[in-house]
Image: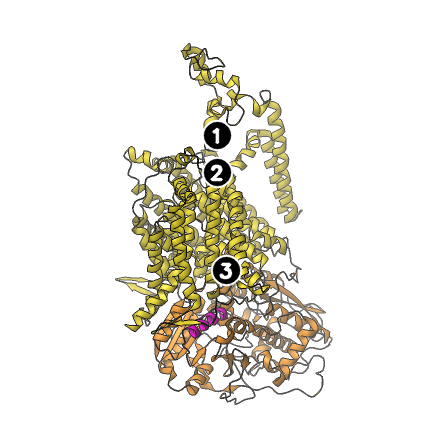
Chain colours: A orange, B yellow
Amino acid sequence: MIVRIGTPPRTRRDRRSTIAVALLASAALLASGCTRAADEVETGAPPTTAANGTTPPADGAPAAGDFGDLEGVCGPGDASGATAQGVTDDAIQVGTIADPGFVGRAGLNQEIFDASEVFTKWCNDAGGINGRKIELVERDAKVTEYKQRITDACLKDFMLVGSGAVFDGAGQEERLSCMLPEIPAFQVAPEARDSDLTVRPLPTALNELPAGAMQFVEANFPGSTERVGFVTGNVGSLVFVDAQLQEGAEQLGWTSVYKSQYNSLGEASWTPLAQALSTADVKGLVYTGEPENLAKLLQAMVEIGYEPEWVLGGTNMIDQSFIDIGGDAVKNVFAVTGVVPAFLADQNPATQQYLDLFAEYVPEGKAEALLGYNSFSAWLLFATAAGECGSDVTRKCVLEAAQNITDWTGGGLHSASNPSQNQFPRCGMVIEINADGFRIPDDFEPTDGLFACSDAGVLILKNDYGTGATLESVGKSLDDLE
Amino acid sequence: MDKFLIFTIVGLSLSAIYAVIASGLVLTYTTTGIFNFAHGAIGMLAAFAYWQVRFDWGWPTPVALVVVIGVLAPAFGLILERGIMRGLNGTSEATKLVVSISLLVGLIGLANLMWEPGQSRPMRTFFQGESIDLGVTSITYHAAITIVVAVLVAIGLRWLLYRTRIGVSMRANVDDRSLTLLNGARPDRIALISWATGCALAAVGGILIAPSLSLEAGSLSLLIVNAYAAAIFGRLRSLPLTFVGAIVIGLSEGYLGAYLPSDNRYLAGLRPAAAVVILFLALLFVPNPRLRTRSQLREYFPSPSRVGTVALAGSVIALAVVMVTTLDTTSLISYGPIFPLGIVALSLVPLVGYAGQISLAQLTFGGIGAIAVAHHGGGGSPLGLVLAMVFAAAIGAIVALPVMRLSGIYLALATAAFAVAMDRWLFNLPDFDLGPLHISLFGLSGTKIEPLSLFGYQFDTPGRQLLLSAVVFALMIVLVAGLRWSRFGRQLVAMRDSEAACATFGLDLRWPRVGVFTLSAAIAGLGGALYGMQLGSVTPGRYDLLAGLPIFILVIVAGAGMVGGALFAGISLYGLIPLTSALGPLFAKINTVTPGLVGIGLGRNPSGAIPVMSESVGPLRRNRPALAAMVAVMVGAYVLRLADVIDNWPFVGLLAVSFLAASTVARVRDQRTTPAPAGGESAGPVDQGIKWAGVTAPWTAADLSAMNASLAFDGVGRDGPVFVPAAPSPSRDSRSDPSDDRQEAHDGRP
């Protein structure tokens, strides 16, 4: 993982109002915040999705403005008129929010900005959206300033596209009050994940749980689900995910024999936890938390000579640093993803094209970080919808055009999803992580390209996991959208 | 039985880590009287240094160990003692605490500057992969080495403290510094050696523990809280008991991992919080500390004046009005926390400033206030804010009752333990029933707080919320200042000045302690509730111990006894730091260590920044015309700003320029109108006060006669005193010299 600290902030157009609140000693102090931040992001990200495989585009180099199997996403045109806030004759101003300025962990989710930059440069080079260039405004929420960035965006932007921020629950009502639509990369807080005026390229419903990986281990390690252990960090957002996983396991009829939380700040020794899992004879471990800590836990397991049959981690485990830290101890770790990871680029032209575009436009960028793919898909969705509106680009038109898309793969970057409905994609792929790298396990049986799809792959949860922000709660309705 | 045996072994190897760290902590505390919160951070720095030389540069392990533990760490200790800790003699516990907490913040910032965060730095254990088979289980070489090191450290320290001359003088230095001095010991050298040894031990601990953690500044520094609990078992003094404590904590973490009923959602979070719960319980059994007798603290806080208090409250509201009328929504949200978190800071003034008690849990009480207003402030009901105070006060009292005997560092640790237990465990719990009570906390996904609505008026915009907080802040300023003037306030100050004297006069100190603790919890609860209202949707992370530490630091830095300190803390943390960070990434980076740096500087000037500031604006305050002109210019600038003639930056510039100009003019005029009595500062021994003669200025014959005069002696020659009582009249005059008043004013701030 490439972390670039001190990367100069890129867009500083609205500097005056963006009085940065970076520092809070708390943030510095608080590395706790950092680790937390990291996972909140990851866990909230749509882990599974998936669908239809990826159709290779026509042979040869793709035409300008074509991405993957999408044709003419961007291109020249004669659109004109200041049809909405942020739209002029020759430009559309769009905001993207992420947290790289977080002092506790500089460069947090920089891939969101990187991918957004790659997309806008590429799209503008291809001619823009019907001739209008995209004017990207990177709005750095630095974890704690999400609400401020929303109010900034309310004043100037046409829309928010490709964003992903850790504390995105804080500004949803402000966003709805100013009727600012959003096409996010990922969302974290329940208020955001189920909010109005949002079209998600990779939806993450609050009451659903993608269970592809769970079903995979159930099928391939018979009997292991009789003795399952749950381990999670003791941070609210992780406990939230863990609670959903526990409910899902219950629905699948698994037997839990051990549950514990670890200290997200770190454990002085992971041996007690490893020993406890071993003593409880846990055969399969469901882990929610940071990759670094799982790596340490796995090492402690090896040291006492204990090896569970499988470990389920979140999508955030698909990260080279997990293997770097864990070394040989990393084995039989499974994660499910709807986004095709970079190591499969040779089997998936869209992924390869994404990497190529990074190399061309932002060569230093975090091209392999999965959340960047989410962001890119959001941008593709936006450009597609805005393109359909022709010259008359309004929030209402773009939002509705995006909502009318029912089958979306981001040009082949990820499995098929249905942006018109806030439901997890029904397809996903299981990734096995071992010391020597990532791979698709031999027993995994794709039904659709690289992915396996089934309605049963997503569990419907019954417990209450919160609700999203609604237009009604701020005294507005869809009729107010212009 | 096997299971029990296995977890005993596992627990013991954990104990060894805590023992090594805790013994370093105890060593510095016993020999220097400073509880080093930064102990873990020093270990962290050492671990980073070790990683650098061992894994990045590839030096052989023994060389790397010697360089880090034998050279770098002790050298760091020496610098620390020379540069920072030496200035802390004679300061209060709160000041010492702030300096060491600031050091913690500063070191984390430093590590982040030197080693980019976010990169993975794999660190292997010693003899990775090798382990010793013990039948039922096995332990790694690394764990075995840790246990051996712990035992060696124990033996070595025992030998050092009891069998060597330097060790004996180390202990003597803590027992009675002056007596030790009389016996010819050199406390400065003792302190140097203590810090060097302490840092080396921290380094050993850091290097042993680092492979279990991802090498990352924050977690390494803060994990050490577990070791603090072990040190408390030994009352921060006894090494054998500290080892017992380490074993208790290590074993309980081990056993909890094995035997905690795992289907209980409420207990799942107990294991990571176990050490702090044990810390809290252990503190309850700390015997009553000796009453502080000689407490000539260097801090000095005058009672707030009525005019000053009203002016301060007024200027808070004026500031809020100016902010609301000049700033855009984004900035209002950014700077909004100045006032609610200022209230949390204000809650520290009666507690730390007046009563000399320390609480690190104020923001946790704020979190309780936020929970109250979230669940009872539906529809903007003001009841929510009232209950925020009531609940916070009630919890405050519950916490205070068992710990009310404690003071100083013990109280600080107890409140820190409470704060950590809350944010690691209790705040994350789902709803539960306690008898007839249904208790809801933050819930899994955070909780929403609705804006206050008072008589149909909705405080639902950032501007209105900011004004609301500012008005409440102003009211609280008056309340807290009024407290200082009351009988209760005088009791608190008396308690701070000398517990022993209070006890002699028959004052029962327990109830003032509980009272002030409860009151300050209530104020913090109100602040936390208003903060939550501004945020709209809150998660426990906003109210954890770490978020609260900077507030604590800044209040002490400003001057804990001054109501203005709270405003200073609020403006610095949530106004100035964000403002300067906006100047560029470099400033943002520097600002990560700013609170730490200012705190570290506290040792030089323990009364804080406010007295210095108020002294420097003294001439301006006395100079009515200059003051009036300045206010007029400021109002003019404000009018220009309102009329949109000028922008925000010129506006701020104008305010600053008018203030600087006015105070310069006032100072010049001040010097002209009151011509210094020939020579100003060095006006001679009488002006300085005779008790400073020979201390701040060389001893002269004139001093001798002045002293004789004031002692009513007469006829003293240079060769020696001739004790002849003098005629009373002239000596009376010199005793009533006005300079005596100045001496009093300077007391405590030499």
What secondary structure predominates along the stretch shown in magenta? helix
Q: Does B133 appear above or below B248? A: below
Tell me: A159 left or right of B9.
right
Q: Work out which quarter of the rendered image holds the C terminus of chain A and state it.
A: bottom right
Q: Does B643 appear above or below B258? A: above
| Chain of the residue on which disc 2 is drawn | B
Which residue is rendered at x = 29% and y = 64% of the image? B433
- Residue range in magenta is A289-306
Residue with the mark numbered 1: B746
Residue with the mark numbered 3: A31
Name the spot of residue A182 as percent of width and height, x first. 57, 70
Between B714 and B242, the one lying in front of the other is B242
Residue B729 forms part of the magenta stretch: no
Quadrant location of residue A378? bottom right
Q: Work out which quarter of the rendered image holds the N terminus of chain A and state it.
A: bottom right
| Chain of the residue on which disc 3 is drawn | A
